[in-house]
Image: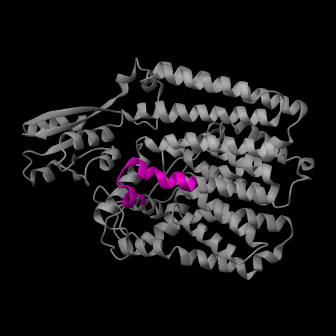
Amino acid sequence: MDLKDTALYKILIALIVLVSVLALFGGVMEPDSALYASIAKNMVLRNDWVNIYVRGADWLDKPHLTFWLAAASFKIFGITAFAYKLPSFLFGLLGAWYVYKLARDIYGEKTGLISTLIFLSSLHILISTFDVRAEVYITTFTLAAIYHYYKAHYHAFWHIVAGSFFAACAIMIKGIFVLIPVFGGFIIYWLLTRQFKQLLKLKWWLAIVLIFIFIIPELYTLYVQFDLHPEKVVFGKTGVSGLKFFFWDSQFGRFFNNGPIKGKGDISFFLHTTLWAFLPWSILFYTAVVNLFKKRNRIDLPAESIMIWTSAAITFLLFSLSKFQLPHYILIILPQFAIITAWYVQKLNGKSLSIFSSIQTTLSVLIVILLSILAIFFKFQDYLLAIAIIIIVLVTSFILFKGLKTETLIGRSLLTSVGLMIFLSSFFYPALLKYEAGMQAGLWLKENYPGTKPMVLIYSDAYSFDFYAKDEPKYFWSYEELEKVNPKGLILFVDKRDIDNVRFKYPAKILQDFRYFHTTKLTPKFLNSNTREEVLEHFFLIKIL
């Protein structure tokens, strides 16, 4: 590989990482990010790392590791949005490093660098840097497990231990289904290459044993919180086993749609999700996948490639067949998508390179046009500056990268992601957060009534209030509960549906009105500044006199 190529791709990787840092200084978004951040906050406030509580009640949905990592960061840096996002960002970089190492070891240095660049610049990775959930952690831990198990084929035994540790971490983020992308590719690879003896080798069975040893902390905490207390009411039932939920209901229950948490499946969901989630690389990726079905295109592929694309394929199929589907699930296999795409991009030449250079250039222009239209309609603060920046980035991409070359295609696409990330992190998402009533109320309350205990009456999906308000809020789930205390002087966070009832029962003063919209489910009426008020809900901070 030419050293000039190496330097270029390293500079582009550094650039996308640098721009992604902007996301660390934004707020926490609802619902999931705010929910997870509030859980970690409660762990620190209660000094209880075993039990998971949401609004004072036992909570059984996700394993603990996501919250442990955030809580550890809170301990070091304080309870802030920055501290919540930092661990995910750092583990995302670790995931990018494993993308590089796996692609480099199988395909070579150049593919490793391009794979890393594609992974870091794909839209859903950029979004997840701002809207932090659990999926970046799962992605990194799953890929790290795959890498170390791949190395365990040929190298030291310690890779079995490392692979099992990371597989266990992935399980303690999401559940045992993560073993499918970890081991599925290996099993199919062994079968297709007639390495049947691998299935019987002691080291792989030892890997399974080690995984179960490493997840003991999770099993212990679930057992203590739920299995030791069958009297607790969870999902409207008593006698709920945390261990059973962990091993069965949270995974198989969702897949078969017979567990306590249900969804509606659409077999085509992740096909169209990938189109936007993997921008600006999705068209190249889908073409690369079609290319893999032609035998002549697989002749010069290393045999280990089977492990990469079958891992992605079976996981994608599993997600598609599941009845419980969310867009961010696709993150788990974006590393494999990036490697497949990177390999294909390097094979483009002549007419095919010309076609895809035109497609990627057109896509870059379309993205800038769409973002500009969005900014004009939304009219967030400094929207003209945002438009100017993304246009400058686009023009710069044409100035810096010229000619019919792979580097031109990759460079222009990467700079498209750079402009997109600046637009989202510095302008669009901060504008959306102004409509997170819970966040705004929590910040307002801390500033104007710093010594007041935060309290919520009856209804609120605004988990951001739980995170941004001082301490752990007190929840009153009925007027009867409120009447059991002397409500005089209390400051309550209430929904518009309840404010009239409260003021009918008690003399009360509205301290502040906060506008609310579910910012992860955007609609044209909300995005249009002329119609936005029609779809906004209202929350209030009121003081009972």
Q: Is 498 placed above or below 398 here?
A: below
Residue closest to the eye, 138 or 219: 138
Magenta part of the chain: 73-92
Q: Position of residue 419 (x, y in %)?
A: 59, 31
Q: Is 254 placed above or below 213 here?
A: above
Q: Could you tell whether 490 is left or right of 212 in the image?
A: left
Q: Please give the count of numbered marks on the rendered protein.
A: 0
Q: Position of residue 21 (x, y in %)?
A: 52, 43
Q: Could you tell whether 376 is left or right of 320 in the image?
A: left
Q: Is residue 74 magenta?
A: yes
* Residue 52 sits in quarter: bottom left
Q: Position of residue 545 (x, y in %)?
A: 6, 39
Residue at 8 percent of width and 44 percent of height: 489
Does residue 231 show up? yes
Q: Give the overall secondary structure of the magenta segment.
A: helix
Q: Position of residue 416 (x, y in %)?
A: 65, 32
Residue closest to the eye, 206 or 121: 121
Q: Could you tell whether 365 is left or right of 507 in the image?
A: right
Q: Is 347 placed above or below 366 here?
A: below
Residue at 56 percent of width and 25 percent of height: 389
The image's colouring method is one colour
Query: Which residue lies most toward the bottom here?
Result: 202
Residue at 33 percent of width and 68 percent of height: 48
Residue closest to the eye, 326 or 430: 430
Q: Is 62 placed above or below 389 here?
A: below
Q: Is residue 470 magenta?
A: no
* Residue 181 sits in quarter: bottom right
Does residue 318 show up? no
Residue at 74 percent of width and 46 percent of height: 114
